[in-house]
């Protein structure tokens, strides 16, 4: 493409309204949420799977982006699925 990373970042921000880092982080957190909802894999494994091998940092980023810890997210998701099943 023959573009500098700074110019590409500027273009990306102008088009999307977010930075490349914000975009990648949001994409990683969406994938982490899917894995928490559909697997019983550990938080350590999920963090590594989405590209954040330091578990403490993964939990910190997840909580900042999603508003809760990965384990609380999983527990809340499981409870909501069970309560929907009982309502039927």
Image (cartoon, rainbow, N blue to C red):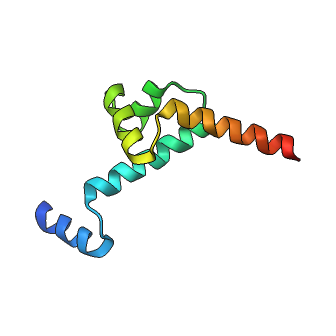
Give how far across and how far down residue 84 sits, in percent. 78, 45
Q: Nearer the viewer, residue 48 or 65?
A: 65
Q: Is residue 81 left or right of residue 32?
A: right
Q: Is residue 80 visible?
A: yes
Q: Nearer the viewer, residue 63 or 21?
A: 63
Q: Is residue 3 left or right of residue 44?
A: left
Rendered position, 79 above or below 17: above
**Depicted 7 relative to depicted 76: above or below:** below
* Residue 20 quadrant: bottom left
Residue 19 screen position, x and y as percent: 25, 61
* Number of marks present in the image shown: 0
User: Residue at the spot x=82%, y=42% of the render?
Assistant: 85
In the rendered image, residue 88, in percent from the top left (x then y), is placed at 89, 47
For image coordinates 37% across by 43% down, the residue present is 64
Residue at image position (24%, 69%) is 13
In which quadrant is the N terminus drawn?
Answer: bottom left
Q: Is residue 68 above or below residue 55?
A: below
- In the rendered image, the residue lying farthest to the bottom is 15
| Camera-nearest residue between 3 and 66 | 66
Residue 1 in sight in this render: no
Q: Position of residue 7 (x, y in %)?
A: 13, 68
Whether residue 16 sits left or right of residue 73 in the image: it is left
Q: Residue at x 19, y 64 (%)?
A: 9
């Amino acid at each position: 493409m023959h573009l500098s990373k700074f110019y590409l970042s500027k273009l990306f921000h102008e088009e999307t309204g977010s930075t490349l880092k914000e975009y990648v982080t949001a994409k990683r957190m969406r994938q982490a949420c899917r894995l928490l909802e559909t697997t019983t894999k550990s938080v350590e494994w999920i963090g590594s799977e989405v590209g954040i091998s330091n578990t403490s940092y993964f939990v910190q980023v997840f909580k900042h982006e999603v508003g809760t810890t990965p384990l609380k997210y999983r527990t809340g998701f499981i409870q909501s699925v069970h309560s929907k099943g009982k309502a039927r």
